[in-house]
Image: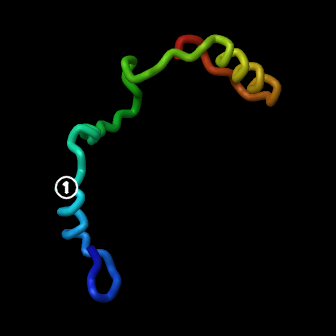
Amino acid sequence: MFHADGSIDAAASDALRARTADPARQRGPRVITSEPSVAAMKPVPEAAVGAVSETLKEQGLPTPSAGR
């Protein structure tokens, strides 16, 4: 995976990774969007939202709006 001068041979490294990687453990292509999908979001316990809101109020910062 290395050239004689010690630098990495990217093509050889990529080929080795492709041969040895377990396809079952690979992630699919990543799609970047400005907003996460509802399915990708996990519910946040009300107590956690309340604690964050209280901390923001104490610091004089705006609190998050409900439902967001």
Residue extending farthest bottom: 5
Q: How many marks?
A: 1
Q: Nearer the viewer, residue 54 or 28?
A: 28
Callout 1 environment at 10 Å: few (<14), some (14 to 19), or many (20+)? few
Q: Residue 7 in the image: x percent, y percent?
A: 33, 80
> Residue drawn at (47%, 19%), measured in percent from left and top?
42
Circle 1 residue: 18
Q: Quadrant of residue 54?
A: top right
In screen coordinates, is 60 left or right of 34? Answer: right
Residue extending farthest right: 58
Q: Residue 63 in the image: x percent, y percent?
A: 68, 21
Q: Residue 65 in the image: x percent, y percent?
A: 60, 16
In screen coordinates, is 19 left or right of 42? Answer: left
> Residue drawn at (25%, 70%), measured in percent from left and top?
10
Q: Residue 35 in the image: x percent, y percent?
A: 41, 28
Task: Specify the quadrant that holds the N terminus.
Answer: bottom left
| SS label for mark 1 | helix
Image colouring: rainbow
Vertical side of 38 occupied by 4: above or below: below
> Residue drawn at (27%, 42%), measured in percent from left and top?
26
Vertical side of 48 occupied by 28: above or below: below
Vertical side of 29 occupied by 46: above or below: above
Q: Quadrant of residue 4?
A: bottom left
Q: Quadrant of residue 5?
A: bottom left
Q: Nearer the viewer, residue 3 or 34?
A: 3
Give the residue type at disc 1.
Answer: Ala
